[in-house]
Image: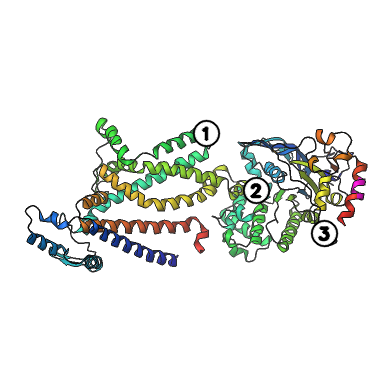
Amino acid sequence: MTTLTKTEDAPVPAGPDPFLSVRDLHVRFSTEDGIVKAVDGLSFDLERGKTLGIVGESGSGKSVTNLAVLGLHNPKSAEITGEITLDGQELTGAREKTLEKLRGNKMAMIFQDALAALSPYYTVGRQIAEPFIKHTGASKREGRQRAIEMLTKVGIPQPNLRVDDYPHQFSGGMRQRAMIAMALVCNPALLIADEPTTALDVTVQAQILDLLKDLQQEFGSAIILITHDLGVVADTADDLLVMYAGRAVERGSVKEILTQPQHPYTWGLLSSMPRLSSDVNEALNPIPGAPPSLLDPPTGCAFHPRCGFVDQVGGASCTSERPPLALGRAAACHLNAEQKQTFFTEQIKPRLG
Amino acid sequence: MLRFLVRRSLGAIVILLLISAFTFFLFFAAPRDPALLACGRNCGPDALAIIHKNMGLDQPVPVQYWHFMAGIFTGRDFAQGPCPAPCFGYSFATGDAVWNTIVDRFPITLSLTIGAAAVFLFVGLATGMLAAWKQGTLLDKLFSSASLVLSSMQIYFIGPIVLTLLVYNTNLLGQPKYVPITEDPVGWFMGLLIPWCVLSIIFTAQYTRMARSAMIEQLQEEHVRTARAKGMSAATVFFRYAWRGSLIPIVTIFGIDLGTLFGGAMITEVTFALPGLGTLSIESVLRTDLPTVMGVMLFAATFIILFNIIVDAAYALIDPRVRLA
């Protein structure tokens, strides 16, 4: 059981510390126009062997959060506060040398666009072998053997030939597999996959997700899967974190969130997803309005300018007070539990079909 | 690769033909008779006609051009004697065989340009990368403003200043001169040190700025971030991943700059009285010495094109994506 799936009345996790724990993370970028609050008070936990899906619109802070976990933000432009602990080790404020030893070794990342994320100047094999050589002290020859082994594992045909190819000689799906091989070469305990399938067509997408699942079973890694595609999450993730404007607005298990969502933003996300079972003539219900500027986010609940349920909350708490989000199954919304239940079953659920 | 070389060589031949034709006909468009120079004072029309005939100037210009171009490959016979291929004729001004003069003077220009290129590539890339590494610091700002000032320093302005300061006033260095490297490597180096530095100053400044911006651009590339995400050290990321990509724009500009470098070498040679091809070409233009002008022009153009092909081939070494294309 992960701490995320515990019920609302037990917000503080009991027992040993979770494998990855993020507490009150803030990431701010200074720009010419002001300070961008890209991540604004985010907390979550993740256990070994589990997959956490993070969903949200572009610019909701998904990628920024995970780059912060790896410590890849430029310290000159990004201000990071809060606590990130991996297996008991504090990552925020850790020395660069310490992070270097963890990156690619204990924690690794799969990037979205493999063509841009792989260096065009070195062979695929060399790029896969590099972190292995660095972190395990293996020789060049062992590194190459390991690269071939990894390429075999991710299903690249003729791996002992393709190992000497350059990324541009690979197809899109193969490049993404090579990227995965590179991330997994040191059997990382934490794997962050940033929209690993967005650039791929649907059949390849399914293969890549299966591959991730298989590899997770083999190595017991914890996976963070960043996506804006709820369909991907439904098949792959155990827990789900819905992000909006740099904050988490709802968390719970995938099943809970997909069947009993509690936050109006999540309702909007689900309503804007096409379903096979729904009538072809029925229009989708996109969320009205546009994501807020992170330079000057709305007061109170960041979602209130686009929310259709503001009137249902007594007083002006939606515009003045930021709703808290407990750990465990929770939604950051001022509606009370009964209202959430009622509105969802009466107004939203019938539309989802 | 072979196809690339064949294609480029054919292109080079066309370019050289165009250059030769252009130079040749431009020469005859000038209202000066080279025979008058050779004829001296008290030159009667009869004497002039004989000189014209000897020089081959009595024939129509296209025929002269044909003879000249054919001579390069087959050799020619002149009144002065036979001229074996590659024959660029005899100088109107001195009567020496042009090819021998070029072969004589070329090592000076070659030493000057290669040395200067080494200086500006090394110093320019090193300072540019250092500025990128220390981006935003005082050092970066210092390098950036210095390169801005230095890139507006002309050779004929800075050359005499350096000469005055280092040679005439303080005697720190000797008068710039050329000693063949085969005779005295140290003397060769010391004699050319000032010309190298002066010729390379503008280039150094430009390459500093170029290397800095290319590095900074590369450091923002996604694949460079991936390298960091793999746990590569900052130095590995900088010198292996970012540096490789930053070379591509620099190599491109270097290919274009080769012609400019030769132009700069000309001015440098004149500034420091080095008897290289640059000095020779300026002398021969002033003396309406057609064979020498043609010889130097074609020789220099061949070299610049050849180096350009080498530079383009170097692309394939740097960027594997070019190899198959």
The answer to whether residue B69 is above or below residue A59 is below
Q: Quadrant of the C terminus of chain A?
A: bottom right
Considering the whole magenta stretch, tell me its main secondary structure. helix
The amino acid marked with disc number 1 is Thr
The amino acid marked with disc number 3 is Arg
Mark 3 element type: loop
Which corner quadrant of the image does residue B307 belong to? bottom left
Chain of the residue under label 2: A
Q: Is residue B261 left or right of residue A160?
A: left
Q: Which residue is mark 1?
A: B137
**Residue closer to the observer: B205 or B126:** B205
Mark 1 element type: loop
Q: Which residue is mark 2?
A: A104
Chain of the residue under label 1: B
**Residue closer to the observer: A51 or B88:** B88
Q: Is residue B325 left or right of residue B298?
A: right
- Crowd band around label 2 with a 10 angstrom C-alpha radius: few (<14), some (14–19), many (20+): many
How many callouts does the rendering have?
3
Chain of the residue under label 3: A
**Residue closer to the observer: B96 or B49:** B49
Nearer mark to the viewer, of 1 and 3? 3
CA–CA distance in space, label 2 to label 1: 30 Å
A345 drawn magenta: yes
Q: Which residue is mark 3?
A: A275
- Crowd band around label 3 with a 10 angstrom C-alpha radius: few (<14), some (14–19), many (20+): some
The disc at residue A189 is none
